[in-house]
Image (cartoon, coloured by chain):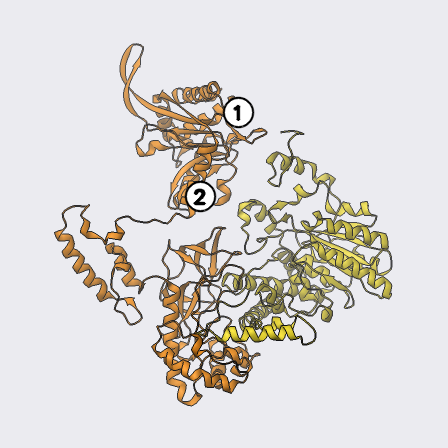
Chain colours: A yellow, B orange
Amino acid sequence: MGAEHLPTSEFEIVELEQALAASDPADAPDMVQLLDADGVLQFDARFSPFAEHLDAEALRGLYRDMFLVRRFDQEATALQRQGQLALWPPLLGQEAAQIGSGRALQPQDYVFPTYREHGVALTRGLQLSSLLKLFRGITNGGWDPREKNFHIYTLVLAAQTLHAVGYAMGIQRDQEDAVSVAYFGDGASSEGDVHESMVFAASNQSPVVFFCQNNHWAISVPTEVQSRIPLSNRASGYGFPGIRVDGNDVVAVHAVTRWALEHARSGKGPVLIEAFTYRMSAHTTADDPTKYRLSSEEAEWRQRDPLSRLAKHLRGAGTGDTFFDEVAAEGEAMASAVRAEVLAMEGPEFEQSFETVYADPHPLVAEELAWHRKYEAGFADTDRSGEGN
Amino acid sequence: MSNTLIFNLPDVGEGLVEADIVSWKVKPGDTVAINEVIVEIETAKSLVELPSPYAGVVAELLAEEGQTVEVGAPIISVQPAGAEAQAEPEKPGGDALAEALPAAPRETPATATATATAAAAAAAAAPEPELKPLVGSGPKADAVKRRPRRSTGVTSPITTTADAAVGNAAPEDTSLANAPAGHHHGVSDSSPAHHAPHVPPVPAAPSAEPAGLRHRRADAQAAVSRLLNRVLAKPPVRKAAKDLGIDLADIVPTGRGGEVTKQDLLSYQAQRDAELDQAETFWAPSRKPQEQRIERLPVKGVRKATAKAMVESAFTAPHVSIFVDVDASRTMEFVKRLKASRDFEGIKVSPLLILAKAVIWAAARNPSVNATWTDDAILVKHFMNLGIAAATPRGLMVPNIKDAQDLSLKELAIALNQLAARAREGKTQPAEMQGGTLTITNIGALGIDTGTPIINPGEVAIVAFGTIKQKPWVLDGEVIPRWVTTLGGSFDHRVVDGDLSARFMADVAAIMEEPALLLD
């Protein structure tokens, strides 16, 4: 071991220990927290003003959003296990980071999500079942991004940060009052695209907020192995503010995001927000986290569940069972509606692929379509199960 | 029972082709709700619990525990709640109702019933789509099968109107009446007029009702028998056959759907018993058809993994094995005293515990045995993840005790017990088998003296613990009975030379001879 030992993707325990030692909590940046683990509101001179407008009704609204998206996530996971979806990336544990930030956005702002931003999608008003079309394999998108200013899910991650900065540069040229928001994770932060996007954003002082959900695991690689310093510290290298916020504290996330949006909107340039959270479930339904992380770690984070923290606060402030029962019932109704919508989703007809080659009719495509129809008609049975792909 | 809902094994990972049924959480007759866990399966990637897509009463389990099932094959059928009122078997993703009334919620059977009547005309009693391919990136359930083509002479001319398509379909329909079951599956779930080239034969609606139903039943059965790809029998028959040691494939089925009936099984058994009476020995040739004289056991799962690991280890690491006889009498006394001590009350203590402690102790004195070979470096571990080879219901597993060097004797005993208990129950998790640094294999449990174990890949040493029994032993010039065991060890010679392996084994042996040395 020692200097001659090159790090590999299969990191050694020793390296991990060194990295963990380097990330001593004492060196960690201050983490903004407005709702502590016991659900008690804290005061922060810089950010509390940005949460002042959250009255009891608004907080209940945030809870409802988080609860509904969690219930939706459960239903989608079950649908995958039932063969109705090819894959599903669960968001369990990241509800506060997504709902808190999503609810801070203005309608004219534009979101560039990863494939896990189900909570943000909810805040943008998307029909939740439309998120499942992609994972059912019947479309390449699922919704019109321009309707709710919510871009389609990015699968090759980190690319969306470049799109977001490009969009922000467009906002500058159009002199709009909007902010572009790039959602990404700790894993994508290791990719080159993120670096390029931050360089361009800083250079142009573009109105973009980089919202990084550090959920601690890039599939099976822990953050400590990817970065020797806290991710939010990276912003200073590019020359714009970086803030670490407790990603399981929906109030703090909301306040910090509002601050960042205001900063970007007023022409002061980009902001990096690192929402410190945890992916409590698998990376996707095709992943088994027991193979790379300890259940004790999961148990520790389960105690910091963003929903139970807000529930604690709400109950402390006098919200009764009626509210929670209503939300639960609403969740069940939403889940069965989503299920029904998914089961009713039909794949596109194969012939559609001929229609999207050229904008106008084309003789070669017409000829190929005729050949295809003839070929299809030539089977003795009418079973088309071999078709597609 | 024609409108039971069938759940096919989904691809729960990305591109999986099969999975093993680990355990059923429901049995026929149980009531299940949507998303209630019904079965645990093991894929190449992980153990997964499957939630029920249907609400109702379990009709049949179509796959047995331990069976390897292909993705797309039916595993359970559920009689939906209020089934008698439901006109159409509900099929995932392939429901004509949905197209007719897109907004209609389908969560309750009652609503479905209401829409069913309304949509009956639209559906035009078209045969239900047979089991569709799974949505997923994995291989299709039966994509390899060639679809039969019409002979060129009867190929219908291409037409674009629905009327013509229906007209053309008529002769085809008659020809299909003679075709073997399984060819006639209506597919299009959408309105025929929109997709003329794909229209299944659609008889006129009023007269079609009984024929449609009949077709549907035949289709459902044919679909099942085609996809099942194995002998059909009801679970009681299946179980009886299993109990009797009869392979269902040997029985001539006479059931209506091609299934082996109880009567078939009984008559086969009577015939077999008669034959067995005549047969003289175990090797008698008449017992089985000629082609079954050799039994084929598919290599998969743990067996496959074990084979791969052993070949990899045996052919990359040059093994050296050494042995030492040990007078373990004091270990036996020590174990006896531990058992009696109040501190160890309720904890199972065996000589394996002392050996484990001895191995940890000896490895600390000879650190290079606790290492990994890489081509450019030897990685010596300053921690001991002590592997224990265990025969489990799922096959040979080597779970390890993490950081065993930090455990007291009592903690080690508890860890060993837990590890053994989990292994016996087949609950060993993949994480428990990773990161091992040195392994003990306890072959003595089966009364074996010693052996030459193969090193667990990624490690450089393994210790085989033979049986402990009373043998003549020479002590101070006299032959006396002592508790004697043989320790065997295999070492990777790339890392561990002869003198090191000898010193390590001598250290282990020293503790077995005098456990009190652990005190220093």
Q: Which residue lies furthest to the left in this view?
A: B278
Image quadrant where one finds the C terminus of chain A: bottom right
**Judging from the image, what secondary structure is the residue with disc 2 in?**
helix
Q: Is residue A149 placed above or below B366 in the rendered structure?
A: below
First in residue order: circle 1 vs circle 2: 2
Instruction: Classify residue B81 by image quadrant.
Output: bottom left
Q: Residue A284, how many percent across, how many down?
A: 58, 55
Label 1 secondary element: helix
- Report in which chain the residue with disc 1 lies: B
Q: Mark 2 points at which residue?
A: B305
Numbered circle sitting on residue B377 = none
Identify the amino acid type marked 2: Ala
Location of residue A1 in the rendering, given as x and y in whole percent from the top left corner? 62, 29
Q: Decide if residue A148 is on the left or right side of residue B60.
A: right
Q: Where is residue A115 in the image (x, y as percent from the top left)?
A: 65, 59
* Residue that mark 1 sits on: B368
Determine contact: label 1, label 2, CB under 8 Å.
no
Residue at image point 47% right, 84% down: B166
Among all residues in the image, which is located at the extreme front?
Answer: B153
Q: Is residue A48 left or right of residue A366?
A: right
Q: Position of residue B227 (x, y in %)?
A: 40, 65
Residue type highlighted by circle 1: Ser
Of B187 and B119, nearer the camera is B187
Q: Residues within 10 Å of mark 2 (few under 14, many from 20)?
A: some
User: Which numbered disc, 1 or 2, marks the residue closer to the eye?
Assistant: 2
Instruction: Say if A198 sits above or below B439 in the image.
Output: below
* Along the line of sight, the residue nearer the viewer: B140 or B178: B178
The quarter of the picture where residue B417 lies is: top left
Q: Residues within 10 Å of mark 1 (few under 14, many from 20)?
A: many
Using the numbered discs, state the Cα–Cα distance from disc 1 to disc 2 in whole angstroms: 27 Å
* View extreme (top): residue: B477
